[in-house]
Image: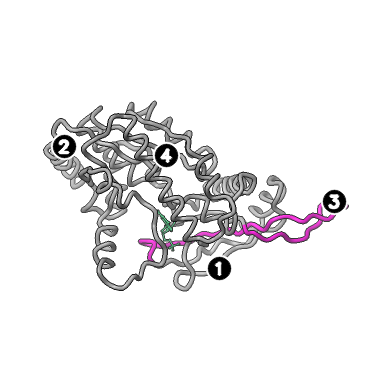
Amino acid sequence: DWTMHAYRERAVEKIRAQVGKGRVLCALSGGVDSSVAAVLIHEAIGDQLTCVFVDHGLMRMNEADEVVAMFRDQYNIPLVHVDASKKFLGELEGQTDPETKRKIIGRLFIEVFEEEAKKIGGAEFLAQGTLYPDVIESVSFSGGPSVTIKSHHNVGGLPERMNMQLVEPLRELFKDEVRALGRELGLPDRFIGRHPFPGPGLAIRCPGGITPEKLDILRKADAIYLDEIRKSGQYDKIWQAFAVLLPVQTVGVMGDGRTYEFVCALRAVTSVDGMTADFYQFDMNFLGKTATRIINEVRGINRVVYDVTSKPPGTIEWE
Ligand code: XMP
């Protein structure tokens, strides 16, 4: 892709001109945007970049290990992996309100990131994978009445607090262009095509209170669901697909016994930009087979339902 090849070269020059001999920190989330930004910046300034991956304990199955392996081992990008799951899960204990959960996660994220930045000896620059739609959204929202439906957790407020300048090499790009740039940079297809994953992670896919046991159940169900979606060749047709563990127990039968376990909701949507979305039309055999696998393989779930709500009126996430 010639356009992206040219973009890459210009972006590398711009980053070098902005950063000089300075040091850059990048908060890596494991998502496509921050990853593409990190690889691009690494190409421009090498080891002047350090990535910090704050592991909040709300990632999906094996996700944290995969991120660390890819950046540290495959790309040789200096990466600090902070396992802060005890801190996050501790403060989230007993919290059931979606916005409160987001605020706690956002605050802790900044605290942990700041602490790590100090340990490394600080940096003049903070890298972010901000995209063009993020830029427009924050401009059109500022000053006007608050129309944000959910307070999205990112590193907002961090640069001012830490007196850092922003490096945002993706500011002119849309999501599909970021993916093209990622491909141009040689990131694996499987990684580039990943569905978006929210900053607060599984915390907002576990409505109500969060416990390590619930997260464990949710992780297993989600992994089975995504495995079935990949195996059936539908992953790339879907914008986002995930399991939600409902705070509801229902009665079931297993062998001669009665069970009383959680309900798991499955969600899948198609979308262009996440602002509106349609529920994805699986065939019933696929849903039946997936439900059977989840109930047979995951202790703690005895019922599976499928969400047929589009956005609007629903949001993509359940919280
Ligand atoms: P909703 O649920 O608002 O989601 O329809 C639209 C898109 O945003 C993602 N999302 C978030 N991303 N922090 C994030 O970084 C958040 O708090 C958050 N809430 C929703 C969601 O996964 C979807 O892609």
- Magenta region's main secondary structure? strand
Which of the two discs, 3 and 4, labels the residue nearer the N terminus?
4
Measure the C-alpha gap from mark 4 to mark 1: 34 Å
Please identify, in this view, whether the residue under mark 3 or under mark 4 is nearer the observer.
4
**Quadrant of the rendered structure where residue 18 is?**
top left
Q: Amino acid at mark 2?
A: Val
Q: Which residues are magenta?
A: 246-275
Residue 146 left/right relative to 286 = left
Type of amino acid under label 1: Val
| Neighbour tally class for label 3: few under 14, some 14-19, many 20 plus, Cα within 10 Å | few
The tag on residue 255 is 3
Mark 1, other Cα within 10 Å: few <14 / some 14–19 / many ≥20: some
For the point 39% across and 54% down, the residue is: 153
Mark 4 nearby-residue class (10 Å; few <14, some 14–19, many ≥20): many
Q: Which residue is mark 4?
A: 54
Q: Residue at x 71, y 59 (%)?
A: 249
Amino acid residing under circle 4: Val
* Mark before the other along the chain sequence, 4 or 1: 4
Q: CA distance from mark 3 to mark 2?
A: 65 Å
Q: Quadrant of residue 283?
A: bottom right
Among the two numbered marks 2 and 4 on one chain, the one whose residue lies closer to the N terminus: 2
Residue picked out by circle 1: 308
Residue at image coords 38%, 65%: 275
What residue does disc 2 label? 19
Residue 273 painted magenta: yes
Say whether residue 151 is magenta.
no
- Percent x, y for residue 105? 45, 50
Q: Nearer the viewer, mark 3 or mark 2?
A: 2
Element at badge 1? loop
Find numbered disc 2 in the image and state the secondary structure of the residue it sits on.
helix
Figure disc tally: 4
